[in-house]
Image (spheres, rainbow, N blue to C red):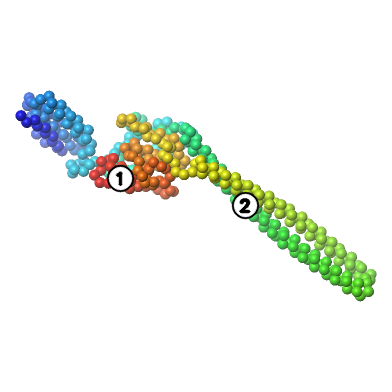
Amino acid sequence: MFKIFTILLFKNRRWISSLISPFRKLKKGWLFITPFNRKYRFVMFCYKHSFFLKISALLLLLFVLMNCSRFGDGSGREACSLSFDYSIDTIDGRFNVTEQEVEAAVMHALELWAPAIDSLHVSRSKAGRNSIRFVYDERQEFWDRSVELKDNIVSGMDRINRLKQERDRAEQQYTLKQGEHQQQVNAMNTSVDGLNEWIDEKNQSGGFGAQDIAALDRQKAVLEHSVETEQRLREELEQLEQVFQQLHDRVNRAITFSNQLTDHFNNEFGGSIDFDGGTYQGTGRRGVITVYQFDSNPELKVLLAHEIGHAMGLGHVENSRSIMNKRMGGQYTGGEMQLSPQDVKEIRKVAGCLQG
């Protein structure tokens, strides 16, 4: 005798009722009606023949139920949809981020993924399948040190700029004073040369009279005043030179210290950073997204988008600008984050889309 399995797919419950009514009185038949989705119902009729047939029918029914979510609207097209149910768990206060800010970052990350598939169902509840928590540990401490070091470098550069401005002003004052001193020296030398020529003429013409001696005394007084002025200008010039040199040395020391800080930062914190700022751990139908470190809100959004991708079943991709790349650094460049073609292909594959 033939062993027959019949699996039928219908949209209308009345069709199901009319179809199965002849079999309701069969004593040698099994009839299974299973929910499928809002539009469909499964009807499976198994002719009762043997125990093996019963077991086979049950296994077949189980297979159908497990895969029913991959059927679409009857056109042969897959559902191309995903769901993400989450809850926000503990947030360590040392992150200085509120629950509202976390929820906004989660929604921003989900809005990034949503356009790549037909539908993304999002829900938040206290018992959400994916728990999001913020745990402060040595990774965030490490990151905080890098932020503090960057702040010190920026502060050092500001100090260098202020010192350079003071040095430049001192240099300008020195240059002006140097010119004034040189003018005084030139005038004094001219006066001395003129006085010497006048004295030589008087000596050659027979000597000094009473009026000549009085004129000589006046010239000496003027010359002495010029000498005093030159000495005063020279002292001021030396003081300005000393101030300029001190400022110049301070600028050089500040630049050296800033370079040391920059080298230290590059050696300890430079380069791309792995996505160890967060992790996703899935156990059965539940998962936990743990955030350990982030530098800013944009970086938090990238981190959450990456870990949510893992929670939805996505793996890593090679493109350095992809959200699902294993290294963080190229996804956010100051503009809006975007999915790479590799990201889109990965989520459409996980969602069961026929295309993409």
- Residue found at x 22% / y 38%: 70
Disc 1 secondary structure class: helix
Task: Residue lying at the far bottom in this picture: please name it.
Answer: 205
The residue located at (39%, 41%) in the rendering is 326
Q: CA distance from mark 2 to mark 1?
A: 54 Å
Q: Which mark is residue 345?
A: 1
Q: Residues within 10 Å of mark 2 (few under 14, many from 20)?
A: some
Q: Position of residue 97 (x, y in %)?
A: 46, 37
- Crowding at dot 1, Cα within 10 Å, few <14 / some 14-19 / many 20+, comes out as some
Residue 176 image offset from top left, x and y in percent = 70, 60
In the rendered structure, which amino acid carries the disc numbered 1? Lys
Identified by mark 2, the residue type is Lys
Kindly tell me whether residue 151 is visible in this rendering: no
Q: Is 52 positioned to the left or the right of 94 in the image?
A: left
**Camera-side residue of 199 and 23:** 199
Residue indicated by mark 2: 164
Determine the residue positioned at 91% across, 67% down: 214
* Residue drawn where x is 11% and y is 36% of the image: 15
Q: Residue furthest front?
A: 267
Cβ atoms at labels 2 and 1 below 8 Å apart: no
Front of the two marks 2 and 1: 1
Numbered label tally: 2
Q: Earlier in the sequence, mark 2 or mark 1?
A: 2
Q: Quadrant of the N terminus?
A: top left
Q: Position of residue 239 (x, y in %)?
A: 73, 53
Using the rendered image of the protein, determine whether residue 174 is visible from the camera's viewpoint.
Answer: yes
Q: Say what secondary structure mark 2 lies in.
A: helix
Question: Would residue 281 be found to the left or right of residue 351 on screen?
Answer: right
195 vs 119, left or right, is right
